[in-house]
Amino acid sequence: MPFACPALRPLSLAALILLAATAGAALPAKPDEGVAVPVTPAMTGAGIVSSGVQLPPIPPVTGSRRQPVASWGKPMPYPIIVADRRNNRLIEIAPDKRIVWEMPSPDLSFYRGNEDVNFSADGKTLAVSEEDNFDIHLVDYDSRTVTWTWGIPDRRGKTGRLMNYPDDSHLLDDGQFLTADIRNCRVLIVNPKTDQITTQWGRPGQCRHNPPHTLAWPNGATPMDNGDILVSEITDAWISRITRSGEVKWSVRAPKLRYPSDAFPTVDGQQVIVADFAKPGRIIIFDPRTGKATWEYFETSGEKMLDHPSIARELPDTGDILVVDDLRNRVLVIDRQTKAIIWQYGVTDTQGHAPGYFNYPDGVDIDVFRDWRPTAAAGAKK
């Protein structure tokens, strides 16, 4: 997900990133402690908040990404878990718009501004990143507890455990944590068991496109089914497919995008879907073999216009498009054929934490692991 002011212009992006990285009254610390970052009211958001709803019991894990639980069908085939950034919470919404799971921040001193969330391969653990808290976490889904943290909250740097605006969070099949350390211009794979970096692509201070040796402000790193990783770079909208061993399979500039945010493979693995973090926002599906767009969503005004969308994903089962529309405080499903908005959670352009509201939603994953339908039936009988 993106990290800078929404008013960025591509031609001045590198300069603005450098200004953002050095702005404020940050005080120098010892080299191994990084630089202290002042915490602003915008960074703490709404504080520790909850929807206040009574949550149903958690169903067991019976599905997987390759064999999902039964679909709810259109318009929303599966529940989604959302990183509700400025509410400092994770929240899961069922297709019928019930809140079925929620985790408010346990402590703002180390858990604040969760901006990306993804399930582990077994569906039991959540990987979370926090850009402007400079850390990443693992969360146990059933107990709603933070089980591991890497990075030092409110301190930025490039040595040891320090990061500078970590974006994206995925727990790989081998149990290692994948993240894009944007302002350090690198992608990291960290082993939670040893707290050691096992893979680094890119180098701090060398922000130019030459993967995997150097990267130009990477803000997306997404694993594919075969273990390859899609890396998106802000400068010039580069998307690259890189193997775990560091071989670049292809590197293509995404068409029509000003600020690519978190590229994902389509369900068949053949194409790439990516959001343009801009106003008006755009969603593109493109074929990396040709570099040409095969599907596009772009509206310039009104209710259908996107304002800095951070994630777009193709939904399994229906093929429709799931979008996190950050600055309009909503998550949408867009019909693949008609391009109509057919499902929405969040009140457009309105912040809140009560049921039906978000406050800067920024990350999303799809819960194909648990069948929440019986809880809907149980609720209907009451």
Image (cartoon, grey):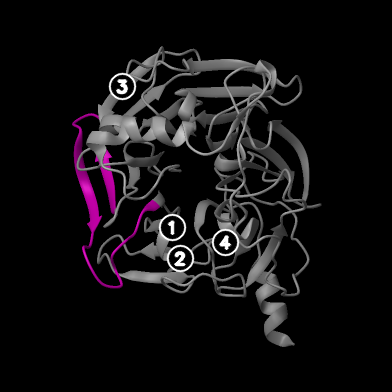
Say which residue label 1 marks: 326
Q: Secondary structure at mark 2?
A: strand
- In front: 162, or 99? 162
User: 186 left or right of 106?
Assistant: left
Say which residue label 4 marks: 79
Q: Would you place residue 43 above or below residue 202 in this image?
A: below
Q: Amino acid at mark 1?
A: Asp
**The magenta stretch spans which residues?**
282-309
Say the numbered circle drawn on residue 330.
2
Residue at mark 3 to residue at mark 2: CA–CA distance: 33 Å
Q: Residues within 10 Å of mark 4 (few under 14, many from 20)?
A: many
Q: Amino acid at mark 4?
A: Pro
Q: Position of residue 174 (x, y in %)?
A: 65, 25
Residue at mark 1 to residue at mark 2: CA–CA distance: 7 Å
Q: Secondary structure at mark 4?
A: loop
Residue at mark 4 to residue at mark 3: CA–CA distance: 33 Å
Say which residue label 3 marks: 250
Q: Earlier in the sequence, mark 1 or mark 3?
A: 3
Q: Amino acid at mark 2?
A: Arg
Residue at mark 1 to residue at mark 4: CA–CA distance: 19 Å
User: 290 left or right of 282?
Assistant: left
Q: Earlier in the sequence, mark 3 or mark 2?
A: 3
